[in-house]
């Protein structure tokens, strides 16, 4: 049975007036409490529900990474920036920064920490010794699955939005607050683009409904009562999947945690590389050493020069700039590793971020000056601007080479 009306019949009547869904399955009594992530009333509802003593287990709409960010102020300070760069997680790190900046602006406007009701539920469960289940999917997996589902233009728009989110200082508008009252932080952070893009909505909302339902079924034990605290926007979909899904939880979770791989053969990069190498080879064969050498020099100057310029504009160390100049012309030959990774690694090693840089990161990224002052943020700027300069250089250099060969 499922009831999505205000909980006049919920245990001890403590959830009266709150959006609640009750599902009985496999001997487990699930109470799904829908909350707004920016509401004092939601915090009080969670407090009353747990204090009632009616529940044996607590589940919350968080993954371990987001719980740590909520409960551990020093979480960022424990980050290994070199490891982030080496493992190709720079974009994900930037996305988390954008989300943190967005949450900071919400807290300043509304006077409440976004996700306060989830944090309270986690801390109270620990205090009372109740089993705590983190039922949401890892935000990194959600982000990667969302990006894989989009075309290059969609990915570019999302990336631009994330960059804007990291540096924006304007107040959060009323539409965003209303979306948060419906109860999903990730959907609100992606804004209207999520509403207009079915593939993005699928990864951010619909898939997570299925995922959380499977997690609840996997952790439920017959005869127990589980309180699940989730955003109100998930209440309807989550209760439906919890009631109706027939596939075993384990294979469903495995499927929803898998990130579709890119094509094993980078056709576009191979085409660009073949075109450039073929044009230079044709230049040597058709025009001799002079033409061939001039084509190579043009390629190096445009790609290396613009990559190094991007690094320079990021305030890079001279050795980082030199690294960008060397790595950028070789971009087609190392397609899986952006040129900015190399300059970023050099920057992070030479100007190693301090503990204070990590602690100040969330505040510093709210202003342009802070990005250049903070060594962690400056590595990210280095990465982004070096890659942007290299990309522009590849297109301009390639066009110049083709125009000379075809002349």
Image (spheres, rainbow, N blue to C red):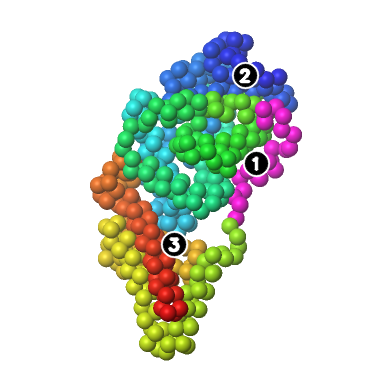
Is 366 positioned to the left or the right of 133 in the image?
left
- Reply above or below: 335 against 93: below
Closer to the camera, 228 or 401?
A: 401
Residue 380, percent across and down? Answer: 36, 53
- Reply above or below: 119 against 99: above
List the residue tagged with mark 3: 338
- Which of the labelled discs sits on residue 4, or is there none? 2
Quarter-wise, where is residue 222 in the image? top right
Closer to the camera, 248 or 3?
A: 3
- Secondary structure found at label 1: helix
Whether tag 3 and tag 2 are in contact, CB under 8 A, the answer is no
- Between disc 3 and disc 2, whose residue precedes? 2
What separation in Å lies between label 1 and label 3 (alpha carbons)?
32 Å
- Secondary structure found at label 3: loop
Whether tag 1 and tag 3 are in contact, CB under 8 A, the answer is no
List the residue tagged with mark 1: 253
- Name of the residue lying farthest toward the bottom: 288
Q: Which residues are magenta?
A: 240-261
The 10 Å Cα crowd at callout 1, few under 14, some 14 to 19, many 20 or more, is some
- Between disc 1 and disc 3, whose residue precedes? 1
The residue at 55%/28% (across/down) is 233
Residue 310, percent across and down? Answer: 32, 60
């Amino acid at each position: 049975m499922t009831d999505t009306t205000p909980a006049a019949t919920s245990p001890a009547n403590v959830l009266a007036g709150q959006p609640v869904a009750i599902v009985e399955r496999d001997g487990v009594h699930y109470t799904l409490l829908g909350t707004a992530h920016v509401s004092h009333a939601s915090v009080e509802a969670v407090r009353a529900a747990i204090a009632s003593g009616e529940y044996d287990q607590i589940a919350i709409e968080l993954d371990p990474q987001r719980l740590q960010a909520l409960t551990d102020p020093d979480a960022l300070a424990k980050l290994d920036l070199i490891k982030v760069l080496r493992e190709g997680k720079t974009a994900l790190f930037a996305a988390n920064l954008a989300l943190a900046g967005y949450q900071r602006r919400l807290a300043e406007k509304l006077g409440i920490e976004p996700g306060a009701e989830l944090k309270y539920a986690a801390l109270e469960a620990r205090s009372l010794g109740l089993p705590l289940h983190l039922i949401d999917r890892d935000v990194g997996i959600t982000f990667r699955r969302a990006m894989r589902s989009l075309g290059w233009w969609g990915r570019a728009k999302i990336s631009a939005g994330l960059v804007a989110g990291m540096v924006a200082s304007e107040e959060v508008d009323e539409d965003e607050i209303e979306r948060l009252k419906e109860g999903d932080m990730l959907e609100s952070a992606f804004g209207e683009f999520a509403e207009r893009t079915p593939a993005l909505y699928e990864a951010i909302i619909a898939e997570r409904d299925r995922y959380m339902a499977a997690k609840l079924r996997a952790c439920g034990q017959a005869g127990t009562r589980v309180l699940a605290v989730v955003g109100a926007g998930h209440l309807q979909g989550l209760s439906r999947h919890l009631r109706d899904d027939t596939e075993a939880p384990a294979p469903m979770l495995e499927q929803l945690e898998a990130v579709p791989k890119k094509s094993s053969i980078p056709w576009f990069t191979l085409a660009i590389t073949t075109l450039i190498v073929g044009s230079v080879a044709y230049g040597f064969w058709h025009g001799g050493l002079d033409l061939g050498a001039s084509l190579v020099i043009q390629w190096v100057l445009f790609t290396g020069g613009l990559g190094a310029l991007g690094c320079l504009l990021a305030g890079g160390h001279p050795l980082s700039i030199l690294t960008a100049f060397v790595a950028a012309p070789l971009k087609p030959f190392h397609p899986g590793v952006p040129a900015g990774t190399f300059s970023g690694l050099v920057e992070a090693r030479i100007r190693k971020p301090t503990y204070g840089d990590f602690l100040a990161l969330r505040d510093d990224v709210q202003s342009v000056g802070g990005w250049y002052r903070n060594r962690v943020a400056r590595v990210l700027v280095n990465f982004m601007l070096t890659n942007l300069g290299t990309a522009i250089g590849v297109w301009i250099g390639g066009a110049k080479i083709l125009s000379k060969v075809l002349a």
